[in-house]
C-alpha cells in the first residue's frame, strides 16, 4: 500500500506516460478515448506485466475487452504488481475460471426486462440500459455478458418500445440511466433522451449511473453541466473504489457537476486487494465528502463469472461498516448491500446493534461496544389523565 493512498489529499497524475502531449490534447475527451490502452502491446510498452496479467489480457479479448483511458492508466503504479488500480483494470488469468457459484447474469436482469434494455425489478423505478460501451472496462463488471461488445450476448436497447413502456406505466416514477456509460453519448444525444423522459409527466426523478468522472474527467465540460441542469431533479451516481482515483482533475469535474445543482452519490464495490481495508475505505469516503459526493452504496461484488479472485467474504464488508458507523461522519457511511443472486434486488446488510429484544425493551450496543436498554413507551394511565384534567380546569 502506498502511504499517499491514506492521505486525504488530491494529486494530479498527468502527464505520466504521455509527457509530450500538449495540455490541449490531454484535456480533449476525444483524444483520451482515441488513445485508450486496449492491446497487450500498448499496455506492455508502458507497464511491466506479470505472466498472469499477460495471459489475462489475451484471454479478455473475447470475454470483456480491456480498455483504459490515458488519464486512468496513469494511476497505475508500474512497479507494484498488487496495485489496486491495476487489479480493477488489467485482466488476470483467474478470469478464465468460472467458480461453481458464478453466473453470467448474476442479478437476473435479463429475466426482468419488459422491453429489451429496460430492467423493471422494483415497483416504482427502472434501470434503462442505454449503451453497452464504457470509457474503460472494470474487470468485475456485473454486466460483462453484454458490455464492451466482444462477449457472446449483445445489448439491444429498443428505444421506441422502452419510451412507450415508460409512458404507459404510471407506477414508474424514477428512471436510472446506465449501461455501459451514458455520459459517453454526445451532449445533444443525452439532451434528447432526457428531454424525451422529462416529457413523461409521472417521471418525477431521473438518475445517471456513470464512471466517466473517474475515467475521463475531461468529459465533464461546462457545456455538459449546463445541459444537464435543464433536466432537474437529476441525480448522478458515480462509481469509485479507491482514494487514488480522486485526483485533482476528478475533484474539479465533480465540483462542476455539484455546482450545476446535481446531487452526487457514490457506489463502490468491495474488492479483494483493492479496497478491502477499513483504512482505505475511510480515506475514500472522506475524500468523497470533500468532493461533495455522498457515499451511497457499498456493494458486495456480484457473482459474475471469473470474479472469485476479486470477491471478499461477506463478514469483511460488515466489519468495514462497523468501523465507519459512529467513528466518522454519518454522511460518510454507505449502505452495504448484496444484490440477491438471480434477481433478488439490493438487500441491505448491517452490523448487529440489537443485542437482545425482550418484550417491552431492546438492548442495544453502541459503536464503542457499550450496551443500553431502550424501553417501549408506557401508556398514560387514565387516572393520571383525569387528575391532570382536573388540575388544569381548576386553574381556569
Ligand atoms: C440498483 C437498481 C435500481 C436502483 O435502486 P436504488 O436502491 O433506488 O438505488 C433500480 N433498478 C435496478 C434493476 C437496479 O439494479
Image (spheres, helix red, strand yellow):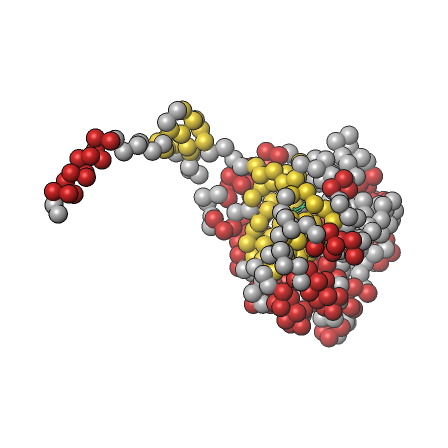
In the image, residue 171 sits, relative to residue 106, either above or below, namely below
Question: Picture coordinates of residue 260 (x, y %)?
Answer: 58, 67
Instruction: Residue lying at the far top in this picture: please name it.
Output: 358
Q: How many marks?
A: 0
Q: Can residue 48 be seen in this view?
A: no
In the image, residue 144 sits, relative to residue 8, either above or below, namely above
- When asked about the image quadrant of residue 313, the answer is top right
Question: Picture coordinates of residue 354 (x, y %)?
Answer: 45, 31
- When asked about the image quadrant of residue 346, the answer is top right
Q: Residue at x 38, y 32 (%)?
A: 371
Q: Which residue is drawn at 37% across and 27% down?
A: 360
Q: Residue at x 59, y 33 (%)?
A: 315
Question: Picture coordinates of residue 37 (x, y %)?
Answer: 81, 58
Q: Is residue 103 visible?
A: yes
Question: Picture coordinates of residue 188 (x, y %)?
Answer: 74, 69
Q: Which residue is drawn at 57% across and 37% down?
A: 349
In the image, residue 381 sits, relative to residue 43, either above or below, namely above
Q: Is residue 223 left or right of residue 332?
A: right
Q: In this view, does 386 lie to the left or right of 114?
A: left
- Front position in the image: 276 or 226: 226
- Front position in the image: 203 or 138: 203
- Front position in the image: 50 or 376: 376
Amino acid at each position: 500500500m502506498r502511504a499517499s493512498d491514506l492521505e486525504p489529499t488530491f494529486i494530479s497524475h498527468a502527464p505520466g506516460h504521455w509527457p509530450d502531449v500538449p495540455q490541449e490534447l490531454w484535456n480533449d475527451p476525444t483524444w483520451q478515448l482515441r488513445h485508450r490502452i486496449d492491446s497487450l502491446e500498448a499496455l506492455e510498452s508502458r507497464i511491466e506485466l506479470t505472466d498472469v496479467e499477460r495471459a489475462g489480457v489475451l484471454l479478455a479479448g473475447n470475454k470483456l475487452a480491456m480498455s483504459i483511458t490515458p488519464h486512468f492508466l496513469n494511476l497505475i503504479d508500474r512497479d507494484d504488481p498488487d496495485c489496486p488500480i491495476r487489479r480493477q483494470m488489467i485482466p488476470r488469468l483467474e478470469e478464465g475460471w468460472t467458480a461453481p457459484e458464478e453466473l453470467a447474469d448474476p442479478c437476473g436482469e435479463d429475466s426482468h426486462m419488459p422491453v429489451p434494455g429496460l430492467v423493471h425489478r422494483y415497483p416504482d423505478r427502472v434501470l434503462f440500459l442505454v449503451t453497452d460501451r464504457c470509457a474503460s472496462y472494470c474487470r468485475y463488471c456485473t454486466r460483462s455478458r453484454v458490455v464492451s461488445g466482444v462477449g457472446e450476448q449483445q445489448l439491444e436497447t429498443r428505444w421506441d418500445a422502452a419510451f412507450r413502456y415508460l409512458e404507459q406505466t404510471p407506477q414508474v416514477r424514477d428512471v436510472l440511466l446506465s449501461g455501459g456509460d451514458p455520459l459517453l453519448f454526445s451532449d445533444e444525444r443525452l439532451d434528447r433522451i432526457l428531454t424525451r423522459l422529462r416529457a413523461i409527466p409521472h417521471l418525477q426523478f431521473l438518475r445517471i449511473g456513470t464512471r466517466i468522472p473517474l475515467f475521463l474527467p475531461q468529459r465533464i465540460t461546462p457545456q455538459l453541466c449546463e445541459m444537464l441542469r435543464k433536466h432537474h431533479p437529476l441525480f448522478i451516481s458515480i462509481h469509485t473504489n479507491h482514494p487514488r482515483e480522486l485526483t485533482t482533475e476528478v475533484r474539479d469535474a465533480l465540483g462542476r457537476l455539484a455546482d450545476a445543482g446535481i446531487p452526487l452519490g457514490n457506489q463502490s464495490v468491495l474488492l479483494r486487494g483493492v479496497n478491502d481495508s477499513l483504512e482505505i475505505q475511510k480515506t475514500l469516503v472522506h475524500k468523497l465528502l470533500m468532493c461533495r459526493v455522498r457515499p451511497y452504496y457499498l456493494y458486495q461484488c456480484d457473482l459474475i463469472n471469473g470474479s472469485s479472485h476479486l470477491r471478499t467474504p461477506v463478514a469483511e464488508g460488515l466489519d468495514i461498516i462497523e468501523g465507519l458507523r459512529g467513528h466518522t461522519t454519518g454522511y460518510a457511511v454507505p449502505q452495504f448491500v448484496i444484490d440477491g443472486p438471480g434477481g433478488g434486488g439490493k438487500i441491505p446488510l448491517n452490523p448487529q446493534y440489537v443485542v437482545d429484544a425482550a418484550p417491552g425493551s431492546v438492548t442495544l450496543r453502541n459503536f464503542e461496544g457499550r450496551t443500553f436498554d431502550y424501553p417501549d413507551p408506557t401508556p398514560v394511565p387514565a387516572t393520571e389523565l383525569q387528575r391532570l384534567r382536573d388540575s388544569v380546569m381548576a386553574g381556569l
